[in-house]
Amino acid sequence: MVARIKVESAKAWGNQHEDHAAYQVKYEKFYKEFRGTSSILGTRVRDYYIPNPITITSPANNRCRVTLEVGQLYVVGCARECSFVRPYTALTSDEKKLLGVN
């Protein structure tokens, strides 16, 4: 699934091995829908389920953590996990073309 989201709230927790951040989001636009049909994945949209909240996990010693800001727009790419996250305003012209954004 590839979508434009707006972050509505954030929650963080962790332990000595990994850190987690869960973001409650509003889906503003779908570029490609996830074809999963299991309710364990999240919120139902038409015939599909989308992750909500979106959870990002990183090793506790990882200095390259992804953090999202409440109120900001992002493009996310998710299969089982959301492995691609980019601020919407930071998309390159080539990325915008791939998404069909003018």
Image: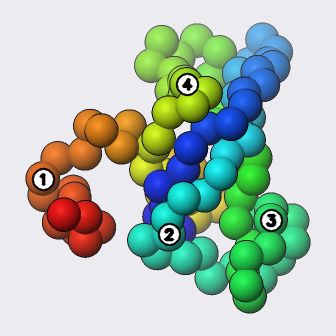
Q: Residues within 10 Å of mark 3 (few under 14, many from 20)?
A: some
Looking at the image, tell me whether mark 4 or mark 2 is earlier in sequence order.
2
The answer to which quarter of the image holds residue 85 is top left
List the single residue furthest toward the right: 39
Image spot of residue 81 (x, y percent): 62, 53
3D distance between C-alphas at marks 3 and 2 = 14 Å
In this rendering, the answer to whether 26 lies above or below 72 is below
Q: Are marks 2 and 1 in contact (CB under 8 Å)?
A: no
Instruction: Name the residue type under label 2.
Output: Phe
Name the residue carrying label 2: 30
Side of 37 where 66 appears, left or right: left
Side of 63 where 52 appears, left or right: right
3D distance between C-alphas at marks 2 and 1 = 18 Å
Q: Residues within 10 Å of mark 1 (few under 14, many from 20)?
A: few
Side of 6 where 38 appears, left or right: right
Looking at the image, tell me whether mark 1 or mark 4 is earlier in sequence order.
4
Q: Secondary structure at mark 1?
A: helix
List the single residue furthest toward the bottom: 47
Looking at the image, tell me whether mark 1 or mark 3 is earlier in sequence order.
3
Instruction: Name the residue type under label 1.
Output: Ser
Instruction: Name the residue type under label 4.
Output: Glu
Q: Which mark is residue 93?
A: 1
Name the residue carrying label 3: 43
Q: Are marks 1 and 3 in contact (CB under 8 Å)?
A: no
Q: Residue at x 54, y 50 (%)?
A: 5
Is any atom of residue 18 visible in this view?
Answer: no
Looking at the image, tell me whether mark 2 or mark 1 is earlier in sequence order.
2
Name the residue carrying label 4: 69
Q: Residues within 10 Å of mark 2 (few under 14, many from 20)?
A: some
3D distance between C-alphas at marks 4 and 2 = 20 Å
